[in-house]
Amino acid sequence: MTPRGFPPRRPRIRENVNEAIRAREVRAVFPDGSVEIMPTQAAVRKAQEMGLDLILIAPTAEPPVAKAMDYGQWQYENKKKQHEAKKKQHVIQVKELKFRPNTDDHDYDFKKNHAIRFLQEGNRVKAVVQFRGREIAHTDLGRKLLMRFAQDLAQYGVAEGLPRMEGRNAHVLLSPVKAVVHPPKEKPKGPDQAPHTPQA
């Protein structure tokens, strides 16, 4: 029973499947490998006689390409492809590292090594020098530190301009050098997947 005040739900229309395909004719691909240009309705009937659906897979082709296959299987394969694409997709982040104008060498080297790792992972790095109290009178020290930082990381990242002041902070932004970005690590292959070396 439909609740009052709500219109009845309409069945969800599958786009680009069977009768929803608007093209007059299609290049129909069937499971046996045969390909035939034919009227869309005829291709739909032929697919349904096989217990399959006709799915438009290349709508911009001339004529559009449609494949006879199981709609549920097609949905599953599409979701699997999207999931794999998301796994491979790398989201670029901005990693922030904070310094003081009088940062000692040990702390500087520690943060520099972090920055190298971030850049190698394909992320951007924002180095920030914070000035507190009377330190604001020595902004030149902060700029020098940032210039040194950018020069030390030149092999891994490119500075997007010179150090800039924003309020009581100075910062510089580094983008990774593509040549040194490490690709995602592949899973180690098992003994059954090890490449076969031909015997001499």
Image (spheres, rainbow, N blue to C red):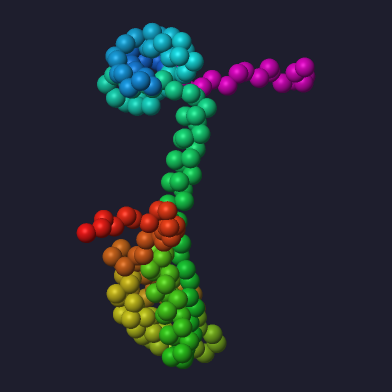
Image quadrant where residue 3 sits: top right
Residue sitting at x 40%, y 15%: 22
Position of residue 110 in the picture relative to residue 144 (left or right): right
x and y percentages locating residue 191 in the rendered image = 43, 58
In magenta stretch: residue 9: yes
Q: Quadrant of the N terminus?
A: top right
Q: Quadrant of the C terminus?
A: bottom left
In this view, the residue in front, 6 or 152, is: 152
Q: Is residue 93 visible?
A: yes
In this view, the residue in front, 140 or 39, is: 39
x and y percentages locating residue 195 in the rendered image = 33, 55
Q: Is residue 147 visible?
A: no
Outermost residue to the front: 200
Looking at the rendering, the stretch of residues picked out in magenta corresponds to: 1-20
Residue sitting at x 29%, y 57%: 197
Residue sitting at x 49%, y 78%: 98
In this view, the residue in front, 73 or 4, is: 73
